[in-house]
Image (spheres, rainbow, N blue to C red):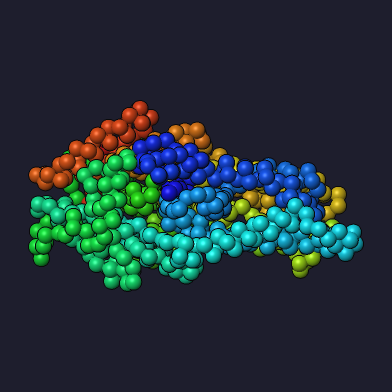
Amino acid sequence: MLVVSTDPAHSLGDALGMRLAASPRRAAGRLDAVELDAPRAFARWLAANRRALGDVLEHGTWLDRDDVDELLDLSIPGIDELLGILEIARLSESDYELIVIDTAPTGHTLRLLAAPDTVAAVAETLDALQEQHRIIRDQLARVGRAEASDRLIATLAAQARDGADRLRDRGQTAFRWVTLPEGMSLAESEDGIGALEAGGLHVEAIVVNRVLPDGAPCPICDRRRAEERRVVAAIRRTLGRGRAIVLVPAELREPHGRRALAALGRVMADGSPNPAIRHRPLPSAISHPPSAIHARARVAAPESIAAFQGASLLFFGGKGGVGKTTVSAAAALRIAKADPTRRVLLLSTDPAHSLSDVFEARVGDTARPLPRGPRNLDVRELDAARAFANRRALIEAALDEIAAAFGAGAVSASGGKASELAKLAPPGIDELFGMLSVVDARGAYDLVVVDTAPTGHALRLLEMPDAAREWTQVLLRVLLKYKSLVRPGQLAVELVEISKSIRELQALMHDGGRTRVIVVTRAAEVPRAETARLLARLRALRLAAPAIVVNAVTMSPGRCARCRATAAAEQREVSALGRLCRGRCAMIEAPLAAPPPRGARALDEWARRWAPN
């Protein structure tokens, strides 16, 4: 049996309590584990197929071999999901009887599962580029045997077809959706499972993790239990039809290491309802406040935190499930309220947007104020694919114009469109064009607050400007090389504008006075380990990370034995997080709220109770 992590910010090794690599290692008994390294996998794939791929691009375009080689040397943003599915296919040919895949959070998992269609589109595009060369070879040169480039295209098409068939075959592939007993997680689950079903992929079971078990009366725990029961009932009523529902009880300490995970696996195998979480009846009227928030006497509301003050761009990043959206929404709300003259934009770049859920209001791709929020705060959920599509049409038209100037030999026989090249754009290029929206927005706003995707893909986004600048510079050099033959025209104009925007974004992001990355985490061992890696990577990228927000901290446990034990474990983790900072970043604790804050009013109240560590 093999367990595979496809998340760029791997936590599988942290959970197992061992160091993993890009090749399978023995974890326990007959269980192997591996954390896929997408850049390394792509380098290996390219080394094996570089000549054949180069032949296709040289045959089907006006580019010469030097141009093609320069393009193939570029880094490929967004290759994670594409290579993830190819690597899984390669591993499935091994002797493992079962492969369990730990995926990235929702938005990028959906991309991973759509990767066979992406591979199919790449194969189709390469086939279109190769077609004219194939006609000349077969009809004029009278050479009928397949070349390496033809075999590459056939292999990609077969891998795409086999991958799609395997994913949709219930006899070979089973999907388990893991969620939390929280309203936002329910909304994300509804969207994610709906997207999978629309793609012909069936989710057989839903695992509800960290369900609070029975216990003595407690102001915080009773509120949490009431909210969790409401969410679990909603899951059974909507998503649970025809699916198994497995409830996993919350542990006092996050399961870590092979022994603890094996015990958790036995609990899950018992099925549902889980005997550990058959709650005692709650009183019909709970006498605690509608949202139980316990905090300390000292407070540090977002507008008073030095790490937030004076910034023009604030990124909030961290592991999936730690509450980045809630923290970034509360911060943007409080900062806007503190200074009504300051224009603030809250922008979500996570493909699985949650701003609509946290504000309980409709949020779309057009920036607009919240119905009950400050008038100087606009909110937007970025549609990265749409941002790329708007520019792609212009780029495709320019490519066709250039090909036409070179003559029929530069045009694909599959319909005469050199714009086929645009279909080979890197998988993450839409996120780049989405990021350029940040530059565009700066003219209208004093502060842009960015709610990012979880760690691995947030880092990809933060690294994207450097990779994109490489791409635009190489393309511009290619155009200038041929300027005596063809006027670069609109494509050059587009590339110059893109390059200028990227340069502005690079300068902005590396200016610690204007741009800061706020790391959001929780006081538990696995999130702490990922936070340590994230901080190290941010420092390597020369990005300012002046604060850590530790979310959902049990600040006033009272007499509840469970809360007291939880608070003690959390403070050990908070101390360890403090050692990561070493005086270089502030530590802010955001209190546990039951239920979690939703809506502008609740977010405002919750953020007023943040506390300095």
Foreground residue, 260 or 347? 260
Residue 244 is left or right of residue 8, and the answer is: left
Decide if residue 121 is on the left or right side of residue 225: right
Residue 525, picture quadrant: top left
Residue found at x 24% / y 34%: 572
Q: Position of residue 581 (x, y in %)?
A: 36, 31
**Residue 171 in view in this figure:** yes
Label tally: 0
* Front residue of this view, candidates 371 and 230: 230
At 32% across and 59% down in the image, what residue appears? 207
Q: Residue at x 50, y 49 (%)?
A: 95
In the image, 349: left or right of 45?
A: left
Residue extending furthest toward the top: 582
Residue 91 percent coordinates (x, y): 52, 49
Q: Which of the pair 338/453 is nearer the observer?
A: 453
Residue 343 showing in the rendered view: no
In the image, what residue occupies the spot 45% across and 53% down? 97
Split into 4 quadrants, where in the image is the C terminus?
top left
Q: Position of residue 418 (x, y in %)?
A: 75, 61
**Residue 283 placement (x, y as % from top left):** 9, 62
Depth check: give the residue in front, 520 or 515: 520
